[in-house]
Image (cartoon, coloured by chain):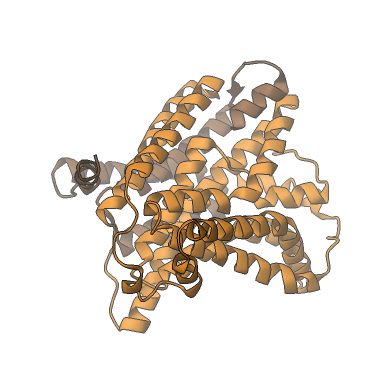
Amino acid sequence: MLAVIYCWSAGSTAPLPFDDFQRHEILLTILQAFLGWLFLVSMSLSAFEAAGLFVLWLIQFLFPSLRHEMLYVYGAWISIEVLLILVGRKPLRAFGAFGRVWRAHR
Amino acid sequence: MKFFRRNAHLAAVGLSPGASPLTALWTFPSMIGAAFIVAWAAEAAEFLISQGLALAVLALIQTLPEFAVEAVIAWKAGKDPDMVHLAIANFTGSLRLLTGVGWPMIYAVAAYFSRKRRGKKLGAIALSDDHAVEVLGLLPPLGYFVLVWAKGNLSLFDAVILTGTYVVYLWVLLRLPPREEMIEEDEELPRVSRWALSQKGWRRWAAVLGLFVVGGAIIYVVAEPFLQSMLALSVALGMEQFVFIQWVAPFLSEFPEKTSAFAWARRVTRAPVALMNMVSSNINQWGVLRHARGDLLLERRLDGPPSVR
């Protein structure tokens, strides 16, 4: 919707450009969302995971100057989660559950 | 970013709010009431359509006030490139607030009430199979945004793809059935939801739809006076205005979502549904990009210079 109204208003179909600062913000948001997704893909949210999401959010909120470092923190946690999935310590239950739901209501 | 953005607003905030703190006496209950009405509507709707679809409708209504504001910002951004900052800042800020505060809040509320009411420690919040639609529904727009980030701009074509992911998500939800158990079996079903479902035939649909419409209309109308009265109240209580802008306004702008999530999380058994309410909000924000938040409502009212940095 943002892009549609932007183009309409600008009177051209040129894309809405992001500068480096905005790209950084978007990347941080993507990483946070992906970490959250990795937590939910096991079809549960534990106390530790909930606390993790909150603490990381609080740090970037209280100390915006650490925004760059936070990229690495999110990235590191994501790597750990992906590693747990690869070695089979963390099940990707969401895909199986979706398959069951899909087949049941086809 | 928030600090940069909001510090820039301090000049704007030098203006005194027009509202009297006493207006909070009607705006606050109205907002809470409306948030509950749409939540009751969604809970009743689960017996007519799939729970996921009911939650998607709920999430759309809860972000209704922001829809109009975002259109204004995007329009201005088309005329003035500086406004792009504001649009992006609000998009990213509100999404991070939802995942970073909303999700953990649900866990904390459910954990507290689990201990208090059942004397039992809450382990993890376990999702049911149906919730896989929301969980997996988050991935396509998120994945596509990696591409948007990599190429560094957002085009009309991207908008079409992202909206497409949202349409597919709704289409899958449309295929899922409503709840099958008898309404009488759900002892926790709120009285209003029960009333709507006790109607016969088309009246039942009309009652549920009516609740959605009434609650949504109140949220839409009350959003701005609500924020104004909260600002006036914070000033009356001696809170620095910038503290309000930095900390309180973003939270208040997600108030309807937080209310329904809180109400469901405290029932513990419904904590997974509360979580899916939030995830559904995440999906519609990534997918349809409806993301300007209430702090912009406030800014517009204060006639602040809409500059960032």
Q: Quadrant of the C terminus of chain B?
A: top right
Q: Position of residue A94 (x, y in %)?
A: 25, 46
Q: Position of residue A4 (x, y in %)?
A: 61, 26
Front position in the image: A47 or A1: A1
Which quadrant holds residue B180? bottom left
Q: Residue at x 27, y 57 (%)?
A: B128
- What colour denotes chain B? orange
Q: Is residue B223 visible?
A: yes
Q: Residue at x 32, y 64 (%)?
A: A47
Left/right placement of residue A19 relative to residue B225 reads left
Q: Is residue B159 above or below residue A27?
A: above
Which quadrant holds residue B112? bottom left
Front position in the image: A24 or B184: B184
Furthest residue toward left: A88
Left/right placement of residue B156 relative to residue B280 reads right
Furthest residue toward front: B201
Which quadrant holds residue A88? top left
- What colour denotes chain A? brown
Q: Quadrant of the N terminus of chain B?
A: top right
Q: Position of residue B71 (x, y in %)?
A: 68, 36
Q: Is residue B193 above or below residue B89?
A: below
Q: Position of residue B298 (x, y in %)?
A: 74, 52
Q: Is residue A68 visible?
A: no
Left/right placement of residue A29 relative to residue B71 reads left
Q: So how many labels did they put on this image?
A: 0
Q: Residue at x 80, y 50 (%)?
A: B301
